[in-house]
C-alpha cells in the first residue's frame, strides 16, 4: 500500500517559504510609526530585517513584523496570506558581515544598501501567526527553526507568470478536476509547492474559493516537479511547462 499523500505544507514550512521571498513587509512597535522593511530573511529562529539608516534606534524594542504574501498574478484579491512575526529587536554591529552571510543563500539586491543608507536588525522569533482564507495558525520559534522553506519558493513567481501567459490550456485542464459547483467561476493559479498546486475560483458575485490539488508524491527537485505536474494534468508526456 502506498503512503498517504501529505495534504499541504505545515504552517511553519509556509511561514519559512513566505519569509524566503521578498514580499512587502512592515515593522511595528509601540510608540513608533510603522517602518517599511527593505528586506527580510530568516536564519533559524531569527528574523533579519533591513531598515533605513534614519529609522529610530530600536535596540531591545519589542516589535512585530508583518509580511504580506501577495500573488504575482492580478487576482481580484492579491493577498494570499499574512504572516506576523513577533520578538525583541537587536541592532547589528557588523551589518556588512551579516549581509555577506545572507547573500550566500539569498542574494537580495537590497543587501547592497546595508552600510550605505540601510542597517540590519535581528529578532529572535518568539511567536509567529499565519493567516489566510482558511483561518489562522500559530507557530513557535522552535517550529520555525526546525522547518525548511519550500524548495520552489523562489521559482513560484516565474512559474505562475509563465503558465498564465504561455499555457492557459493547462489551467483549463486543472479546472476539470474541480467540483462542478465551481464551473461558473474563473479559475486562476494561486500557488505551487512541492506537494501540489493551489487554484483560486473567482466569481464576480460570489465569494472566491481556494482549492488545492495534491501531487501523487512530494516533488523535491525540478525534474520531480515537472513529472508531478504532468501526472496531475493526466498527460505524462506534456512538455514546455518549465519557466524560462
Image (cartoon, grey):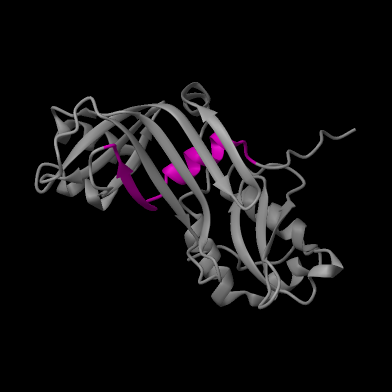
Where's the N terminus, which quadrant? Answer: top right
Residue lying at the far front of the rendered structure:
31
The residue located at (21%, 44%) in the rendering is 51
The segment highlighted magenta reads: 9-30
- In the image, residue 194 above or below residue 57: below
Q: Please tell me whether residue 25 belongs to the stretch shown in magenta.
A: yes
Residue 105 seen in the current view: yes
Residue lying at the far right of the rendered structure:
1
- In the image, residue 69 above or below residue 158: above
Residue 107 seen in the current view: no
Q: Give the mark count.
A: 0
Give residue 168's position: percent from left, percent from top: 64, 76
| 97 displayed left or right of 238 | left
| 74 displayed left or right of 194 | left
Q: Please tell me whether residue 27 belongs to the stretch shown in magenta.
A: yes
| 26 displayed left or right of 31 | right
The residue located at (51%, 72%) in the rendering is 74
Quadrant location of residue 86? top left
Residue lying at the far top of the rendered structure:
142
Quadrant location of residue 218? top right
Give residue 240's position: percent from left, percent from top: 61, 68
Give residue 239's position: percent from left, percent from top: 65, 67
| 235 displayed left or right of 49 | right
The residue located at (60%, 61%) in the rendering is 190
> Of 113 and 31, which appears nearest the observer?
31
The residue located at (77%, 40%) in the rendering is 5
Amino acid at each position: 500500500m502506498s503512503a498517504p499523500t501529505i495534504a499541504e505544507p505545515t504552517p511553519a514550512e509556509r511561514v519559512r517559504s513566505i519569509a524566503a521571498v521578498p514580499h512587502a513587509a512592515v515593522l511595528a512597535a509601540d510608540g513608533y510609526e510603522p517602518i517599511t522593511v527593505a528586506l527580510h530573511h530568516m536564519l533559524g529562529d531569527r528574523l533579519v530585517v533591513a531598515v533605513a539608516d534614519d529609522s529610530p534606534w530600536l535596540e531591545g524594542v519589542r516589535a512585530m513584523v508583518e509580511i504580506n504574501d501577495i500573488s504575482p498574478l492580478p487576482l481580484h484579491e492579491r493577498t494570499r496570506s499574512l504572516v506576523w512575526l513577533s520578538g525583541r529587536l537587536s541592532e547589528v554591529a557588523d551589518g556588512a558581515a551579516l549581509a555577506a552571510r545572507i547573500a550566500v543563500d539569498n542574494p537580495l539586491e537590497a543587501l547592497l544598501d546595508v552600510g550605505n543608507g540601510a542597517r540590519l536588525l535581528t529578532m529572535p522569533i518568539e511567536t509567529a501567526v499565519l493567516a489566510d482564507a482558511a483561518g489562522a495558525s500559530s507557530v513557535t520559534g522552535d517550529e520555525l527553526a526546525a522547518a525548511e522553506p519550500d524548495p520552489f519558493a523562489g521559482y513560484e513567481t516565474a512559474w505562475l507568470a509563465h503558465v498564465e501567459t504561455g499555457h492557459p490550456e493547462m489551467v483549463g485542464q486543472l479546472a476539470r478536476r474541480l467540483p462542478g459547483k465551481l464551473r461558473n467561476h474563473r479559475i486562476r493559479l494561486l500557488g505551487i509547492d512541492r506537494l501540489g498546486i493551489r487554484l483560486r475560483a473567482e466569481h464576480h458575485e460570489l465569494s472566491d474559493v481556494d482549492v488545492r490539488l495534491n501531487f501523487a508524491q512530494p516533488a523535491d527537485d525540478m525534474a520531480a516537479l515537472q513529472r508531478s505536474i504532468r501526472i496531475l494534468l493526466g498527460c505524462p508526456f506534456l512538455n514546455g511547462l518549465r519557466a524560462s
